Image (cartoon, rainbow, N blue to C red):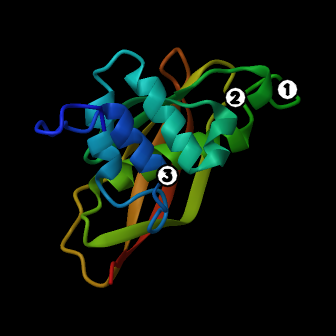
Amino acid sequence: MRRTPNHVRATPSCRDYAERWVTEKPYYVMSSPNRSLMLWQRLSPLPAGRWLFARLVCRRAPYFATIRPRIVELRHGRCEVRIRKRRAVENHLGTVHAIAICNMAELAAGLASDATVPATHRWIPKGMTVDYLRKAGTDLRAVAELELIPALGEKAELPVYVTAYDESGESVFRATIRMWLSARH
């Protein structure tokens, strides 16, 4: 909280909110549902807010930092993530490594799920089916989309569809990530 006179209560700043989001113990996978979306909505309009949001996500789930993601869009049912083609994510052919693309797809699917799944349920990736359509020789963007969530019982499986595109707009990768949803108790 910002320092203020004793008689005035300060509202938390973005930094306070972000620090609390990172330092609190995660209840399940990334965060409780819709907290990511709330933080995104608060940070993304700010200068360097999208960069900060991506760093916070990578601090929460460190393996995602290996691809240095840039989150471009996050809303209910959709997330768009971009990565640069750089030496650290290349394979022996000089193209973006398949696992780096899978990493980007899982991040996009996870954020889309986190922004969409109601607070009564939690999620975790259960499986991934992948199609490599062509070599990924440029920077990439992954778009994760999920359909409207039906009425949820105790447990459900939710498919999240992810497509990765190169700079020319051609699809280079397609994946279906099955998210396992279960009720919070």
What's under tag 1, amino acid-wise?
Leu
Question: Which residue is at 32% across, 40% downward?
Answer: 39
Query: Which quadrant of the rendered structure holds the N terminus?
Result: top left
Asked which secondary structure carries label 2, the reply is: loop
What's under tag 3, amino acid-wise?
Thr
Give the residue at the far right of this rendering.
Answer: 92
For residue 42, above or below residue 57: above
Asked which secondary structure carries label 3, the reply is: helix
Q: Residues within 10 Å of mark 1 (few under 14, many from 20)?
A: few
Asked which secondary structure carries label 1, the reply is: loop
Q: Earlier in the sequence, mark 2 or mark 1?
A: 1
Tell me the residue that label 1 is attached to.
93
Residue 98 in the image, given as x and y percentages of width and height: 71, 40
Is residue 25 left or right of 132 when viewed as pictured? left
Verify CB contact (< 8 Å) between mark 2 and mark 1.
yes
Question: Which residue is at 26% across, 66% downward?
Answer: 119
For residue 118, above or below residue 10: below
Q: CA distance from mark 2 to mark 3?
A: 39 Å
Q: CA distance from mark 2 to mark 1?
A: 9 Å
Rendering quarter of residue 80: top left
The one of 31 and 12 positioned closer to us in this rendering? 12
Q: How many marks?
A: 3
Question: Which residue is at 47% across, 62% downward?
Answer: 26
What's under tag 2, amino acid-wise?
Lys
Q: Residues within 10 Å of mark 2 (few under 14, many from 20)?
A: some
Q: Earlier in the sequence, mark 2 or mark 3?
A: 3
